Amino acid sequence: MPDSPVFAAAAVAAPHRLASEAGRAILAEGGNAIEAMVAMAATIAVVYPHMNAIGGDGFWLVHEPGGKVHAIEACGPAGSLATIERYREKGHDVLPARGPDAAITVAGAIGGWQAALSLSSSLGGRLPLKDLLSDAIRHCAEGYDISESELRTWPQEVDAVKAAPGFSDFFWPGGERPKAGDRRKPTALAATLEQLSHAGLDDFYRGDIGRELAEDLGRIGAPITRADLEAFRARAVQALSLKLPGLTVYNFPPPTQGLTALMILGIFEKLGVTRPESFDHHHGLVEAVKRALAIRDKVVTDPAFMTVDPASLLTEAALEREAAKIDRRRAASWPFRPGEGDTIWMGAIDGSGLAVSYIQSLYWEYGSGCILRKTGVNWQNRGVSFSLDAKALNPLTPGRKPFHTLNPPLARFDDGRIVSYGAMGGDGQPQFQAQILSRYRFGQGVADAVDAPRWLFGRTWGAGSISLKLENRFDPMLLARLTAAGHPVEEYSEAYSDQFGHAGMLVKHQKGHVEATHDPRSDGDAGGI
């Protein structure tokens, strides 16, 4: 049975209990959902370092009680030295995924915290930054137990990541993986967070921390300069939205795959499925995933270079057209370009109804693997999604934003309910989101919708096969029907597997209370006041 959901006046959900505790403590101090999320984001960056770090990116969706939706894009562009010619001269045919040459893009997460707190202040937020970062600093200074999730994680290209500057000393001392009961004390990162708590978050880009970051990036040979850091600022953008019967769903515009998540929901809606957990339910979602991913891979790039208006792909006509291409009885064949990604999603809703959906990531597990010596910051490898082909959809170009699998969703029901939900998992993110939200719309409770068995179409997280992967709790009759319809079914032995994401869901109900849950597949939970 799934864990019981939390019922409270305000609540948070995160994939590590220390992060949810940090957020809950801020709510208890009178902080709002944005302030709680910054505390959670800082803490999760410390205690879940295989999934995210302050050397990565982040995306925010914030729903005001009055209905206005804010979107904060906190993703950094490629550094000014990151040219195709540079990598070709080094003998690369494809971008390396680990090491200094993989540390291609500016880290945007801290800039996102800064922008979010500015919004918070305009909405009445009042807590000082030192309070928001205090739990993260304490866990650095005192040390923390290495999580079960990290102990289960085997990095892709393990030899390359072990060779990245600082990785083995910090993550795998002596070249050995950590084991149960081990603790970690990132003292350099503690000093960095302490400095930010006093000097302000801008120091990460334009102050002493920015200077130290630039010196270390230059020392290891990464293509990011001090000027690149100084030039970066997170920005407010217009969220994408899709009206469905009874609700409106919001997600992030390009360069993220938020468009994909909304298209899946919109295409599936046009199929008119009425029976949950049926063949029509799961076959319809899988086929909608294929249609949406195919479009994503043709059009989504840095918005400055987009040739298609994303909103035009969410019209009634566009969604009807894609749904009409789905065979209701047979699986379509599929050429697939996989997208990897390890990430965290977290949600918060406060007593006023201010709701946050937030996602923060390094891209691959441990990112580039580079630990910058002076600051203890682990740098992302998001730039590996660029191409060294100048004619590609996402060519490597200084100042260009990479394609992002990250996308934080929100939903507003016509009856007044506000839903913050999401999941990690690269290309799986929009698939897991669709399964969770469709189950909730079909009448499953919050905890049941997140707990229920999930599937993943494609090839991700190092799996070698292009298949429809499923946890082992599905009805065998459903698996037989999916197989008969031509789906390449691959049933996992686990009932709950990390391969199927770490998801969460919070619902602010009309009567004022918040219902919240987080995934039993993670090390996290939900907490409320």
Image (cartoon, rainbow, N blue to C red):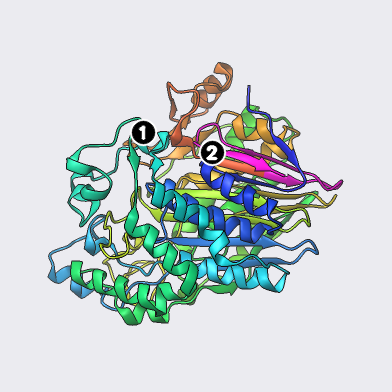
Q: Is residue 139 left or right of residue 480?
A: left
Quarter placement of the C terminus: top right
| 60 versus 287 height, above or below | below
Q: Is residue 38 visible?
A: yes
Estimate the x, y position of residue 66 in percent, counting from the top left. 81, 64
Query: Residue 64, located in which quarter of the rendered image?
Result: bottom right
Per the rendering, the mark at residue 152 is 1
Task: Write the residue at 31% across / 36% down.
Answer: 464
Closer-to-camera residue (252/100): 100
Magenta span includes 511? yes
Classed neighbour count for the residue bearing mark 1: other residues with Cα under 10 Å, few (<14), some (14–19), many (≥20): few
Q: Name the amino acid, label 1.
A: Arg
Image quadrant where residue 318 sits: bottom right
Give the quarter of the figure containing the N terminus: top right
Q: Which residues are magenta?
A: 506-529
C-alpha distance separating marks 1 and 2:
15 Å
Q: Which badge, 1 or 2, is on the more N-terminal residue?
A: 1
**Residue 28 percent location from the top left of the image:** 69, 51
Q: How many marks?
A: 2
Query: Residue 305 — which label?
Result: none
